[in-house]
Image: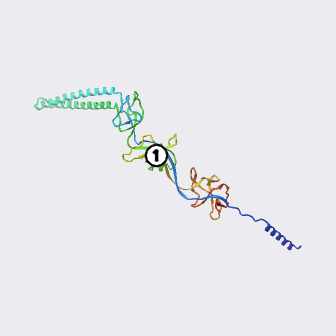
Amino acid sequence: MPCAYRSRFAALGVALWLAAAPPVLAEAPLAVQIVTAHTGPVFFHVELSGTITAAEAVPVGFRAEGRILTLTAEVGMRIAEGQILAQLDPTQAAAALRAAQAQDAAAEAMLVQAEQARARAAELAERGAATQAALDAATEAALSARSSRDQARAALAKAQQALEDCTLRAPADGIVTERDAEPGQIVGAAQTVLTIARDGAREAVFYVPDFSALDRFQGRTVTLRPVEGTGPEREAIVTEIAPLVAGESGTVRVKAQLIGAPGEKPPGLGTAVVSVVDLPYGSAMALPWSALVRQGAKPAVWTVDPKTRRAQLTPIRVLRYTDNQIEVAEGLSEGALVVTEGAHLLYPGRVVMQEGAQ
């Protein structure tokens, strides 16, 4: 058989074999869950718990040193301004007062004598029976006696004050919150004996974890709710954020002053309160946890080309991880299609379809 005929028969045989072979099926799209990524505001959810304290706590102590004779104030006691809270042993102060009174009386008598002597010297000088030098001497003695009398009066006033300082009185209306001394104890001048929570403004004190957005608390209004749920909700303004972190707990102290209407009774000291605050934390795209995969050591997600329906791995930068989602700061365009379920079955170029779509 000529060569040309053999070639034609071979080509015909190949064509017949291809025609008889089953057709190659195209890859079936993988059914996955797909969401559309949209940018939205992000909030830092913070739950606060704290206690109600007085906005002004006044430490109270004796002006003098000595031994405490009586101390009637107890923690939790309500006191009124001027009320006697404690007393020192007044023995030494009373003796010093009696001595000062005696010195004052003596100085007063010497002044009277000196004034009388000056008056006589002046009268004699007018009649020419005494010299000017004698009058000057009498005047000088009178001035010296007056000065001594004034010093004695100052010493008397000081002794009277020292005796009064043996009695500790309440500087303002309030509640005793701390008691740092007991009867019979020797205390120094200005040593704190009691601490009084002054009536009036109240504030809530919280201890919160340190985080980058903590400074955004300053000046915010928060709603306080009693833990026991027995009292009304109150509004408060954050007035202070401690500049340092507590070494033991790693938390930061935050104070919020209560906003009270005129005549409204403030909550009791020590009342436990809670508050929930959502702080603005920028903007991001929120996606379910199931969308997160890895590209090497970096986070990524599978995105879908809306035209070809093929998947591709896209690296992202995560702003924050929460309990049930991730917040993507960079890497995705607005309206991007992201695979949230079935990502573990994907590879680059895999054709996908929305689960449930026909």
- Amino acid type, label 1: Arg
What residue do we see at 29% from left, 28% from top? 97
Occupied quadrant, residue 157: top left
Residue at mark 1: 225
- Residue 178, relative to residue 301: is it above or below? above
- Give the percent coordinates (x, y) of residue 247: 51, 40
Q: Is residue 311 above or below residue 86?
A: below
Residue at the limit of the structure toward the right, as seen here: 1
Taking 318 as reference, is 90 above or below it? above
Query: What residue is at 11 percent from the left and 32 percent from the top?
Result: 126
Of residues 248 and 268, which is closer to you in this image? Answer: 268
Q: Residue furthest front?
A: 230
Q: Point out residue 66 in the picture as x, y percentages from the top left corner.
A: 37, 28
Q: Quadrant of the C terminus?
A: bottom right
Q: Nearer the viewer, residue 326 or 1?
A: 326
At 42% from the left and 44% from the top, the residue drawn is 203
Q: Residues within 10 Å of mark 1 (few under 14, many from 20)?
A: some
Residue 346 image offset from top left, x and y in percent: 67, 57
Q: Disc 1 on helix, strand or loop?
A: strand
- The answer to whether residue 209 is left or right of residue 98 is right
Q: Is residue 62 left or right of residue 317?
A: left
Task: Using residue 219 as the reference point, say whether residue 295 is left or right of it.
Answer: right
